[in-house]
Image (cartoon, rainbow, N blue to C red):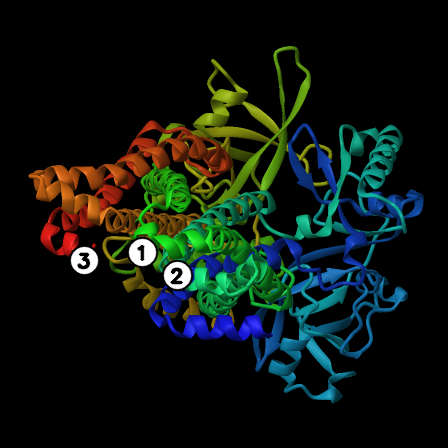
Amino acid sequence: MLGLRHALRSLKRSPGFCATATLVLALGIAAVTLTFSVANAFFFRSLPFREPETLVHVWQTDPRLGSELGVSVPNFLDWKARNKVFKDLGGYYSGTVDVITEGRPLQVPFGRVTPNLIGLLGVEPLLGRTFTPDEDQAGRDHVVILAESFWRGRFGGSPSVIGKTLEMEAMAFTIVGVMPSEFAFPSRAAQVWVPLPLEPSRPRGSNGALRVVGRLRPGTAVRAAQAEMSSLMEDLAEEYPDANQGKTATVVPLRRALLSSYDRIQRGVALATAASGFLLLMVCANVGNLLLVRGAGRRREIAVRMAMGGSRLRVTWELFTESILLALAGGVLGVGLAAGLVRLLSPLVSEDLYRAGNLEIDGSVLAFTVLASIASALVFGLAPALDATGRSPSRFLKEGDRGAIVDRSGRKLRSALVVSQVAIAVVLLVGSALAIQSFLRLRSANLGFNPDNVVTLELLLPTSKYNSARAHNLFYAEVVHRLGSMPGVTAVAYTYPLPLTEERHVMSFEVRNDVSRAEKQSAPAFSVSPGYFTAMEIPFLRGRDFGGADDLESARVVVVNRRMAERVWPGRDAVGQTVRLDPGSRGERIATVIGVVADSKHRASEETPSSIYTSQLQVGTRGRVLVVRTESEPLEVVAAAKREIETLDPIVPITTIRTMNEVLSESLLLRREGTRALAVLGGVALALAALGVYGVVSYVAGQRAFEIGVRVALGAERRDVAALVLYEGAFLAAAGVVLGLAGAAGFTKLMESLLYDVRALDLLSFVEASLAISIVTLLAAYVPARRASQTDPARVLARS
């Protein structure tokens, strides 16, 4: 306690030092706190289910297609009956459902789940009950469970909601329960849940969209479950070869399955964690240097205390206590800064990124911050405390202030800290340069279509009125006609899905190879209307576009892109070739290739894949995205387009309106914010390195003031004196750059999979970072060097 009081009094006497050290520490601690809060939300915080570590997701996969597939109901029932590693298996679909609100349909995200799934996840309802086992039977499945947010918004949080009806898809559903807000399954957006009827009579080869969750038996590892399911799929392939040949099952932890782009986010978070950790090390080195300088100024005080009987251990502990207090103060301020940044970042996180709760500063994050603060104190405080008490007090008291001139060990330690700062700054600057270069190339990459002057409107027809593919086609045909007649509109079409979004549809197909054997493959697929390629300005290379005659009654046709044509039919004309779409499924059909178009991107950050385009008129989905190309500013036609659609049918909702450039910007959001964060870290690192060099060179110049005064008195040129001091900074900068380049070569390996069209060992980025840090640190060293060259020898010698 006495040591704590002494530390507080000592720090109180140096308010400027305390403020500087606390602010610098707050920057580093805020950076690591922010990155940990992201990692905690995505990867560490427990999923809001009972014993989440025993929950897994079971995909049905086809290695030949390289994609994850839905599970057929017969396969799912066989999995349930014949496995020995799961306590239970449950299935679900997800999507949107029409809920009638004030006479109008409202599109609400929902989950259709097997009656046992909520119990399998182990979450109790907030109100009412969950589904009973018999509610998967036709006639008994018109029951619904509400999300807490939907219950409060739609029914005012009234407990009497149980037993009331909710009209969905033109049918009445009885409300039987309300789930708490933490129950976010299969996504955070889900608002209602209904039972999923299982029809064993459905074709086994029809993959559908069934997803499967399992709870492992006690003591069962994921690896054992994987072996069991692989063996089971081999048995099913022998029993039902037409449906299951070549297919297997993949078992993964539930978190990995529910988090969109898990691997990519994991790599990005790992990179951000490493970068923020480097920054904290720089901060520690900077504060360590401040403490060394402060310790040198307190040498007489420390010597007197030790001469009067104070033990080295006690004095060292008291000095280290000051470091702990500084670290904790920096931690408190850092948490405040991180909390503000979290509030700014939270709205940027897509609903598609499932996570266990919100991005927030919770108990785990606070505990991490305390540990990080204490660890920082150890890094920056222990060595200066030991250095300050490592001199003989009798020697210092005999030599007086002149004894402080020779401080070789302290000088070496300060120099080592500055070299480490420069090295870390080089690492972060190289990373920043690579990220910026990668993002600029990605932003300017050729998409294969023209996003300028295009606005998109997403529609989803209510099934209560539009219950057939023919009805869907008639409605959209009229919409295209009306919008195409508006002034300023040059082209109108529709597609599903929209390029550059997270939505993706993969279609399997078979072709005949040179030995007339069926070869199963897959490719991303888009269902588009006639005129889509014109509206998006995707050039036709051969063949023709879809036409109005390519409808439900006509023979199936497809258009492929150049990459697919060259991959599947090398050296041959793809036009006129036939493919078997969705082979082995209930929807299997033969299609003829009628055209080849230029390659275009599906996701901005990925290479252009092989692609299949099918005629939307031959599919007839109720959800489509209108693509409207205009002569000028696309948003100017939105109001008129909405009026035309409302005139045609006022109950049809327009769920999303975005320009294609907005879609492009949203698709680059994670990369843009990641690049911005790395650039900020690099800039802060550059500033800290400059401060470190400035501080050490200034201190060295002060220690050598007597020597410099003598040199000037004896006739030394002032430029020679400046060069003498500047050499100190140049040497530190050069040593840091060499070490930093070596470290950057390893750090950029972490970035390799996140870069676009840039090599991890890009020479230009390494040269740019080296030049930037060299110029800035030399400028920082020049200031004290110039000041030293102006030394008045008479004043210095008189004072000595």
Residue 799 numbered mark, or none: 3
For the point 35% across and 40% down, which residue is it? 449
Q: Mark 3: which secondary structure?
A: helix
Q: Nearer the viewer, residue 341 or 114?
A: 341
> What percent of the width, then of the height, locates residue 70?
71, 45
Whether residue 619 is visible, yes or no, is yes
For the point 48% across and 24% down, which residue is it? 565
For label 3, count other residues whose C-alpha is less than 10 Å away and answer few (under 14), some (14-19) or many (20+): few
Q: Earlier in the sequence, mark 2 or mark 1?
A: 2
> How far apart are the two marked residues, 3 and 2, measured between alpha carbons?
18 Å
Q: Amino acid at mark 3?
A: Arg
Label 3 with label 2: CB-CB less than 8 Å = no
Residue picked out by circle 1:
401
Q: Mark 1: which secondary structure?
A: helix
Q: Nearer the viewer, residue 229 or 655?
A: 229
Q: Nearer the viewer, residue 97 or 411?
A: 411
Residue picked out by circle 2:
300
For the point 58% across and 46% down, which residue is it? 266
Q: Earlier in the sequence, mark 3 or mark 1?
A: 1
